[in-house]
Image: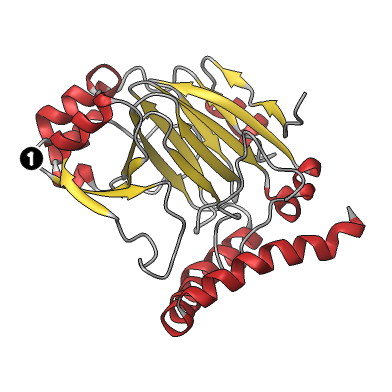
Amino acid sequence: MKERLELAEIPREKKISKNDFLERYVKPQKPVVIEQLIEDWPAYTKWNLEYIREVAGDKTVPLFDGTKAISSKYKFNEPHLHMKMSEYIDLLRKGPTSYRIFLYHLLREVPELQNDFNFPKIGLRILKQIPMLFFGGENSKVFMHYDIDYANILHFHFHGSKRCILFPPSETKYLYKVPHALITREDIDFMNPDFDQFPALKQAKGMVTEIVHGETLYMPEGYWHQMTYLTPGFSMSLRAAPRNLENLSKAMYNLFFMRHFDNAMRRWKGQKWIDYKNEQAVKRVDKRADTF
């Protein structure tokens, strides 16, 4: 039988008190799925693809093709295509598609949606900002990455289901992280990894879950995460600043130096810079292999 990654199930709580959430998950920095955190939100009963079509069908949205590797042809987070939201939802309905909407300010474009959620009083100092939405079609994937700001994240899913694979920061040394970036090598299939090409992955210990409409996934600071939409659907995240000072300093480095340095190198070296980084991702892991 083909070898698989070592992935434990992420624990689940139907409901949880503020104190238990802080003590069991936030303080030890462990992920959890909370099944019934947002049942009092209007979004819980209202938000589905047809409702989004009704209120936002005329909006032009940016699309990202998950099958396209990062290249110098596009700037970081530059969309590959634009279309009307109604056309995109039609595309989702037709069957599997690799096109996703990533970091889109739909709630700014359609302010009435801001009335459909609130900020959970669960012990995190959630940033009071308008959240962005993420959409994906069946089988579309979000590459393995961690967030630039090392936030504590509450990730809410709507309409359908998706698989979420997580790794704590301690496993970074096995994941073929691309230097000067927030991602691993894009050619790694985390559900069906090639251990001949990426042998260090055998040592990585991660977690996995499938979340459905109305469920909340808590992702601690700096956690790697990769998402696969099992059906068409969409998600929203609320964020709280890192509580750990070391992680806060890493976030500042990412925000104020790393991303600007990487963008400058892309402009200067183009595709050679991206190819160099992907080569270094493997070389750096291989160099440490004897210590595993």
As helix, strand or loop, the secondary structure at mark 1 comes to: loop
The quadrant of the image that shows the N terminus is top right
Q: Position of residue 110 (x, y in %)?
A: 14, 41
Residue 268 appearing in the image:
yes
Residue 47 against residue 80 in the figure, above or below? above
Residue drawn at 50 percent across, 59 percent down: 148
Residue drawn at 33 percent across, 49 percent down: 64
Please state which of residues 94 and 227 is positioned toward the viewer in this rendering: 94
Q: What residue sits right under mark 1 in the picture? A: 58
Residue 128 appearing in the image:
no
Please state which of residues 239 and 214 is positioned toward the viewer in this rendering: 214
Q: Amino acid at mark 1?
A: Asp
Residue drawn at 46 percent across, 39 percent down: 141
Q: Which color scheme is applied?
A: secondary structure
Q: Position of residue 114 (x, y in %)?
A: 21, 37
Specify few, some or many for label 1: CA neighbours under 10 Å numbering under 14, 14-19, or 20 or more: few
Residue 165 against residue 211 in the figure, above or below? below
